[in-house]
C-alpha cells in the first residue's frame, strides 16, 4: 500500500487539493481535520469547553464518527448525523485546534487513521501526518502559502457562501492565531517533516496547485 501524507497550516487548501489529487490517482482520501472538527463540534454541543482536556476526554467513549465517500465526496457522520457542512463553520476551526491539543483525543484518532493506511492506498492530510500519524509514508508534502493569501482565500470562500460575519482583517487574525496555536502545542505540533517536500502555492491557482502536488507524488513514487 502507498501512503501520501500532506501537512500544512490552516487555510492552505489541503483538503480541496488533496481531495482532487486523490480522485485523480484513485486513492482513498482521508481528511483528518474533519475528525478533529467533529470532536470539537460534539464538545460544543454538549456544553464542554474544547480547551477542557478532562471534559473533552470524558466525551470520547460516547463518540461514533464515520467517514464515508458518497459520489466521490467525503461525508462525516457523528452518531449517524451528517455533519459535513456544520463542521466547516468558522468557529469550528478554533474548536478543532483546541481539542487537537489533548493527548487523549490524538490517541483516540491515531489508530483509526493508521488502520485506513494499512488497508488502502491513502492520501491523508492534516498537521502531523508525516511526522506522527504516518511517519513511514512513502510521500510527504508540506503544503503552505502566506498567511495573507490563505486569509484572502478563506474570506472569499465565506463571502461566496453568503457569510459576512467576519471582515478580511478578522479572518487574517484568526489564521495567524491558528498558526501559532498549531505550531506551539505540546503534542504533535505543526512542523515540516525532515523528508517532506515543501510546496508553496501562494502564487498558484487551484489547478496549478493540484498539478504541483501530482508532479511531486509522481516523481517520488517513480523513485520507489
Image: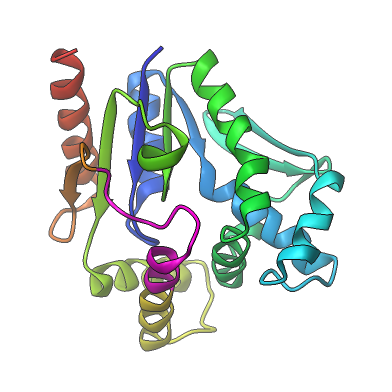
Q: Image quadrant of residue 208? A: top left
Does the rendering let one see residue 84? no
Q: Image quadrant of residue 48? A: bottom right
In-front residue for pair 79/194: 194
Any magenta on residue 181? yes
Q: Is residue 149 left or right of residue 62?
A: left
In-front residue for pair 159/30: 30
From the top left corner, tell me how far across and down residue 140 is, in percent.
28, 34
Q: Image quadrant of residue 24? A: top left
Does the rendering let one see residue 182? yes
Q: Is residue 85 left or right of residue 181?
A: right
Any magenta on residue 199? no
From the top left corner, tell me how far across and down residue 55 is, in percent.
80, 65
Is 94 rendered above or below residue 60? below
- Residue at image coords 36%, 35%: 5
Quadrant for the C terminus in the image = top left
- Residue at image coords 69%, 69%: 50
Q: Is residue 194 left or right of residue 27?
A: left
Quadrant for the N terminus in the image = top left
Provide the residue span drawn in magenta. Answer: 178-193
Q: How many marks?
A: 0
In-front residue for pair 189/167: 189
Amino acid at each position: 500500500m502507498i501512503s501520501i501524507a500532506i501537512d500544512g497550516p490552516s487555510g492552505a487548501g489541503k483538503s480541496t487539493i488533496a481531495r482532487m489529487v486523490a480522485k485523480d490517482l484513485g486513492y482513498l482520501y482521508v481528511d483528518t481535520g474533519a475528525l478533529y472538527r467533529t470532536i470539537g463540534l460534539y464538545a460544543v454541543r454538549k456544553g464542554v469547553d474544547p480547551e477542557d482536556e478532562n471534559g473533552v476526554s470524558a466525551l470520547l467513549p460516547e463518540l461514533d464518527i464515520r467517514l464515508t465517500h458518497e459520489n466521490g465526496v467525503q461525508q462525516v457522520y457523528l452518531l449517524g448525523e451528517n455533519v459535513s457542512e456544520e463542521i466547516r463553520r468558522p468557529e469550528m476551526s478554533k474548536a478543532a485546534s483546541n481539542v487537537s491539543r489533548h493527548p487523549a483525543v490524538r490517541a483516540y484518532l491515531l489508530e483509526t487513521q493508521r488502520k485506513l493506511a494499512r488497508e488502502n492506498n491513502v492520501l491523508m492530510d492534516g498537521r502531523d501526518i508525516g511526522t506522527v500519524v504516518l511517519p513511514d509514508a512513502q510521500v510527504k508534502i508540506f503544503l503552505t502559502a502566506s498567511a495573507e493569501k490563505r486569509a484572502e482565500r478563506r474570506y472569499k470562500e465565506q463571502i461566496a457562501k453568503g457569510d459576512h460575519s467576519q471582515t478580511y482583517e478578522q479572518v487574517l487574525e484568526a489564521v495567524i492565531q491558528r498558526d501559532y496555536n498549531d505550531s506551539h502545542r505540546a503534542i504533535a505540533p505543526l512542523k515540516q517533516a525532515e523528508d517532506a517536500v515543501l510546496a508553496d502555492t501562494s502564487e498558484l491557482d487551484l489547478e496549478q496547485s493540484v498539478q504541483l502536488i501530482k508532479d511531486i507524488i509522481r516523481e517520488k513514487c517513480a523513485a520507489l
